[in-house]
Image: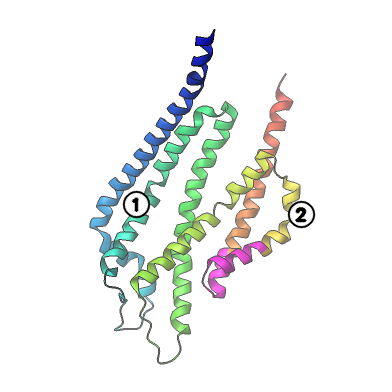
Amino acid sequence: MTEQNSQNPQDEGQPLIEHLIELRSRLLRSMICVVIVFLPLFYFANPLYSYISEPLRAYMPAGTTMIATEVASPFLTPFKLSLVLAVFISVPYILHQAWSFISPGLYSNEKKFALPLLISSIVLFYSGIAFAFYVVFPLVFGFFSTAAPEGVTVMTDINRYLDFVLKLFFAFGLAFEIPIATVLLVWSGATTVENLKKKRPYVIVGCFIVGMLLTPPDVISQILLAVPMWLLFEFGILFSYWVRREPAEQEATDP
């Protein structure tokens, strides 16, 4: 009897060790994926930076160029861009590894709901980045180039520009996840669609506050972030209404 009791802690601890080993394995796979994607991207690091900086360079005065104010910037800035792009591109595989790790512990109805939500979050994140690059950047940089005082030449540092771009990429990528967050709140029971509708005025004000905090101090970029956030919140309410009603419809059809 004593011998059986002494083996119970080991039996209980074994699943935890197996989970930790699996977690380490999936983290290593994700890191290897990032490295594999990074290597070819780094080979084209300079052309990639030229493409990323095109929205700004298109509005720079004739005869001016971007500058590097630090000694290592010409190397480190394209390196950082390639690494961040490798992480962005690897996001679907990284989330797949996360899904493979947590899915065995989910119920069948939770898997049915979570998988489309996961795919939608990836699409929305990439959509936010594309919206920032193709819609917001031309407007923002066009405004900045015309707002410079007379006699001031616009010559942006390449590292500062990359930090600015990455900040907006993350801001718009995360902002486009609002429908997912809204659906999760309703689905988990943390709130209801009716409560979200009642709080719509506060949400609109909050969107503009977030736009003010996450974007540069100009009205254009703040509006271009706040308005999509509000519209995405409305889409989230619509999807949440459908998610909320689905369980009731299933219960009504059950014998």
What's under tag 1, amino acid-wise?
Ala
Quarter of the image containing the N terminus?
top right
Task: Magenta stretch: give its range.
Answer: 206-225
The mark nearer the N terminus, 1 or 2, is: 1
Residues at marks 1 and 2, CA–CA distance in whole angstroms: 41 Å
Above or below: residue 74 compared with residue 156: above
Disc 1 target residue: 86
Q: Quick one: 39 or 131, which is closer to the camera?
A: 39
In the image, what residue occupies the spot 48% across and 54% down?
127
Q: From the viewer's perspective, is the residue at label 1 or at label 2 nearer?
A: 1
Disc 2 target residue: 198
| Residue 123 place in picture, x, y as percent | 48, 48
Q: Residue furthest left?
A: 43
Task: Give the SS element for disc 2.
Answer: helix
Residue 204, label in figure: none
| Residue 68 place in picture, x, y as percent | 30, 74
Q: Quick one: 121 or 103, which is closer to the camera?
A: 103
Q: Residue furthest front?
A: 2
In the image, what residue occupies the spot 33% across and 43% down?
33
Q: Are marks 1 and 2 in contact (CB under 8 Å)?
A: no
What's under tag 2, amino acid-wise?
Lys
- Say whether residue 211 is magenta: yes
Query: Which quadrant of the structure image shows residue 45?
Result: bottom left
In the image, what residue occupies the spot 58% across and 27% down?
107
In the image, what residue occupies the spot 54% across and 75% down?
218
| Residue 133 place in picture, x, y as percent | 43, 63
